[in-house]
Amino acid sequence: PTPAPTPAPTPAPTPVLMPAPTPAPALSIWLNKESEYSDVGQITVSCPDGMTLTSCTCYSAWFACKGSQSAGASCTAYSTGALVKAVARCGWLSQTSNWQDVSSLMSGTGDDVTTEVECPAGTQ
């Protein structure tokens, strides 16, 4: 009898090149944190530890907002005497640095009255 032919060696698998991983986004988690309602003049809410305050507003179903102001990771809403709540928008920020608080003058008290502020030179 003739011996069976020796099977050819199995070729090595062709390597699959994977794309480079995408860097994590600079802003990865958002959280809106609201205070309870208050009518005592002002109420403050703060972002959880490790999160950065990115927006601070006053909310009232009774048109009682007198304005809002941020300081560090805290947001304070001011009331004309009826119920308001402070609403902080918090972000888990990575790959960023040199955050600065920039505050405008207080806006007017009417509906849709705005105020503006600019970032310092050399920042975004």
Image: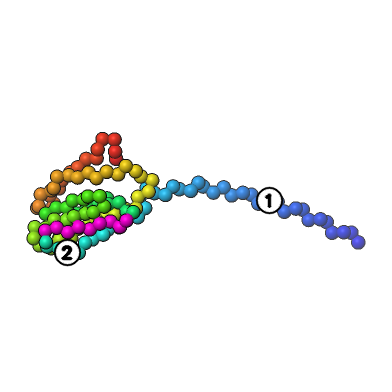
Tell me, yes or no, if residue 48 can be seen here: yes
Q: Estimate how packed mark 2 is, as few (under 14), some (14 to 19) or many (20 or more) residues with alpha carbons within 10 Å.
A: some
Three-letter code for the amino acid on which mark 1 is drawn: Ala
In the figure, 2 relative to 115: above or below? below
Residue 65 seen in this snapshot: no
Pair 2/1: label in front: 2
Query: What residue lies at 32% left-to-right and 56% top-to-bottom?
Result: 49
- The spot of residue 103 in percent (x, y) is 19, 45
User: Which quadrant would residue 5 be assigned to in this image?
Assistant: bottom right
- Residue type beneath disc 2: Tyr
Measured Cα–Cα span from mark 2 to mark 1: 68 Å
Q: Which residues are magenta?
A: 41-49
- Expressed as whole percent of the image width and height from the top left, the position of residue 113 reads 12, 49
Magenta stretch: includes residue 45: yes
**Quadrant assignment for the C terminus:** top left
Q: Which mark is residue 12?
A: 1
Which image quadrant: the N terminus? bottom right
Residue linked to disc 2:
37
